[in-house]
Image (cartoon, rainbow, N blue to C red):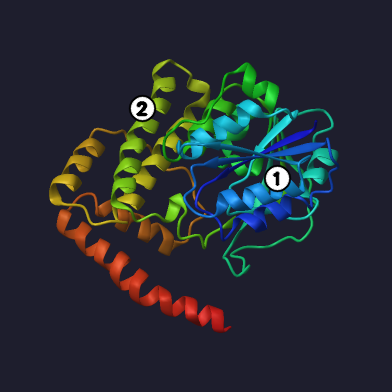
């Protein structure tokens, strides 16, 4: 079997059929690939949808049901059951363009690289893209070499834009961590082991930005507090490799630590914390290292907004003001008007 596609499923009934239908249009025959859907205790109608697809396509879809363990736990469950030479992960609110997986396997995996990285486009629920949307999987190789070199040079963060050789994952005992932002920790663990890495320009994955229930969009206070705690666990994990003297991966490690701190500032302003809660996290942040940022292609306005997020960690009054502007003025008043206008167009 060439490929195992792991699809974690939680509270995605509005997006799940689109995802699963796209996996039926990959130009691959029975026995060439499998789709392992892990129902992670989903409270909505996702279980019924999965059962229907498994019944109609038993040679392709396999459903595993478990109590909720989070995204990382669901990915680990699927990986443990995988039989393909390669493993890939697809979030259930995203999808893949037609014939992408067969094209990638045929054109770029002939000599069996350990990791194949491909491109994606961000979309909204209505199908509109935020960047160039390529309708075919055509592409070319832009990098072929040592994964340490690749990861030091580029932020190859997401697991859903890659094929991983299953034997490589097993050999190095790599698992998803049961924490927020596990993609970056997982890939740090992968690339530090010097995988033969190939990067291609094929733009095939479609990343959904319109799912209000996604981890990135949650405004549940307890979940945000957990994410903030997880950031410190992730930073400690990456810092451990630096402490152990693995200097060759140092540029990527410093970038990862900065990224985790950026996520911290982003999450901090998504909910209103009490002064005591805010102060506790601020105290933790003060003890963390801050590295010189890597060059960025962000616009001036994006960098300015990034600084605003960071300033919210220095003054509780400023933090409350930023929270009010973001959560009340923008998301409750301005953004609904923007969406209505976009729908009308």
Q: State the SS at label 1.
A: helix
Is disc 1 surrounded by few (<14), some (14 to 19) or many (20+) residues within 10 Å? some
The one nearer the camera, 20 or 62, is 62
* Residue 238 to residue 64: above or below: above
Disc on res. 68: none
Q: What residue is at 48 percent from the left and 80 percent from the top? A: 340
What x and y, as percent, mark residue 38? 58, 39
Q: Label 1 vs label 2: CA separation?
A: 41 Å
Q: How far across and down, in percent of the image, does residue 192 sit? A: 56, 24
Left or right, 42 with respect to 79, comes to left
Of residues 56 and 333, the one nearer the viewer is 56
Q: Is residue 196 left or right of residue 25?
A: left
Residue shown at 45% from the left, 40% from the top: 181
The one nearer the camera, 41 or 312, is 41
Q: Nearer the viewer, residue 8 or 309?
A: 8
> Is residue 155 in sight in this rendering?
no
Residue 161 in view of the camera:
yes
Q: How many marks?
A: 2
From the image, tell me which residue sits under label 2: 236
Q: Is residue 319 left or right of residue 298?
A: left
Name the residue at 22% across, 37% down: 286
Regarding mark 2 in the picture, which secondary structure is present there?
A: helix
Q: Nearer the viewer, mark 1 or mark 2?
A: 1
**Which quarter shows the N terminus?**
top right
Asked which quadrant contains residue 90, the reply is top right
Task: From the top left corner, tell me how far across and down residue 78 is, in percent.
Answer: 61, 33
Query: Which residue lies under the disc numbered 1?
Result: 54
Residue at 44% across, 50% down: 215
Q: In this rendering, is residue 7 above or below 78?
A: below
| Residue 69, percent from left and from top | 45, 36
Q: Using residue 167 as the reference point, say whether residue 293 is left or right of it.
A: left
């Amino acid at each position: 079997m060439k490929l195992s596609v792991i699809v974690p499923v939680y509270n995605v009934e509005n997006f799940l059929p689109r995802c699963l239908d796209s996996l039926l249009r990959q130009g691959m025959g029975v026995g060439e690939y499998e789709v392992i859907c892990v129902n992670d205790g989903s409270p909505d109608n996702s279980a019924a949808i999965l059962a229907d697809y498994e019944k109609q396509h038993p040679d392709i879809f396999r459903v595993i049901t478990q109590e909720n363990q989070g995204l990382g736990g669901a990915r680990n469950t699927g990986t443990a059951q995988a039989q393909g030479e390669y493993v890939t992960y697809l979030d259930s609110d995203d999808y893949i363009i037609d014939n992408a997986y067969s094209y990638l396997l045929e054109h770029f995996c002939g000599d069996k690289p350990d990791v194949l990285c491909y491109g994606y486009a961000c979309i909204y629920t209505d199908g509109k893209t935020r960047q160039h949307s390529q309708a075919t999987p055509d592409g070319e190789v832009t990098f072929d070499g040592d994964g340490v070199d690749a990861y030091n040079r580029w932020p190859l963060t997401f697991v859903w834009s890659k094929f991983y050789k299953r034997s490589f994952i097993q050999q190095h005992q790599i698992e998803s961590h049961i924490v927020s932002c596990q993609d970056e920790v997982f890939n740090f663990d992968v690339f530090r082991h010097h995988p033969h890495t190939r990067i291609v320009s094929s733009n095939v994955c479609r990343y959904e930005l319109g799912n209000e229930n996604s981890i990135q969009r949650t405004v549940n206070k307890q979940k945000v507090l957990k994410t903030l705690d997880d950031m410190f666990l992730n930073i400690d994990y990456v810092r451990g490799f630096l402490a152990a003297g693995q200097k060759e991966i140092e540029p990527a490690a410093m970038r990862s630590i900065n990224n985790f701190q950026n996520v911290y500032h982003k999450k901090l302003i998504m909910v209103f914390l009490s002064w005591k809660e805010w102060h506790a996290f601020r105290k933790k942040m003060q003890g963390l290292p801050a590295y010189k940022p890597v060059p960025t292609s962000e616009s001036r306005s994006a960098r300015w907004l990034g600084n605003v997020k960071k300033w919210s960690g220095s003054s509780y009054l400023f933090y409350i003001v930023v929270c009010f502007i973001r959560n009340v003025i923008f998301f409750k008043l301005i953004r609904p008007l923007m969406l209505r206008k976009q729908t009308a167009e």
